[in-house]
Amino acid sequence: MPEAQMLDVLVAGGGYVGLSLAVAVKKAAPHLAVEVVDGAPDHAWRKDERAFAIVAAARNLLDVLGIWNGLEPIASIVPMSPTCLPRLISSNRAKPVERVN
């Protein structure tokens, strides 16, 4: 059995919010031991075909954290407009989800 590792910060969730949080904490306090855990199987993200909308403020945060430059080459950047979402859905680049109230 591996030896237990002491952590200062454990982030539950390896989505872009959890990963951004881990990067932000590590940049703010490099001396802290930060770990991200996620329940998804290894490399599950490679099969994830969901589309994500990232608002300008979130994009700016990713830029400040030094993450955006790595994402930009693989991102499909589509300027948002009132007609953008229906076009994304009809082109099958994004799938609508049922709204739950």
Image: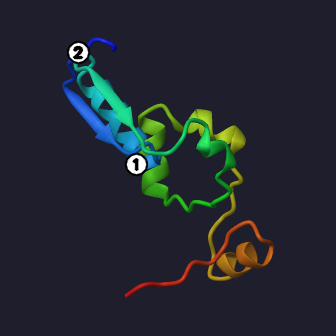
Relative to 48, is 36 above or below? Answer: above
Find residue 78 and report its horizontal and vertical position in percent: 69, 62
Horizontal arrangement in the rendering, residue 2 relative to residue 80 (left or right): left
Dot 1: within a 10 Å radius of its alpha carbon, few (fewer than 14), some, or many (20 or more) residues? few
The residue depicted at 62 percent of the width and 82 percent of the height is: 82
Toward the right, the furthest residue is 91
Residue 83 image offset from top left, x and y in percent: 68, 82
Residue beneath disc 2: 31
Horizontal side of 54 relative to 1 (left or right) equals: right
Disc 1 on helix, strand or loop?
Answer: helix
Q: Residue furthest front?
A: 1
Q: Secondary structure at mark 2?
A: loop
Q: Nearer the viewer, residue 46 or 26?
A: 46
47, 73: nearer the viewer: 47
Which residue is identified by label 1? Answer: 17
Relative to 48, residue 22 above or below? above
Quadrant containing the C terminus is bottom left
Answer with mark 2 or mark 1, whichever residue precedes in sequence: 1
Q: Amino acid at mark 1?
A: Val
Q: Residue at x 33, y 13 (%)?
A: 2
Neighbourhood count class around disc 2 (C-alpha, 10 Å): few under 14, some 14–19, many 20 upward: few
Q: Quadrant of residue 72?
A: top right
Q: Residue at x 68, y 56 (%)?
A: 49
Q: Is residue 50 above or below residue 5?
A: below
Identify which residue is drawn at 40% across, 40% down.
20
Cα–Cα gap, marks 2 and 1: 21 Å
* Residue type at the position of mark 2: His
Q: Position of residue 41 (x, y in %)?
A: 54, 41
98 in relation to 18, above or below: below
Name the colour scheme: rainbow
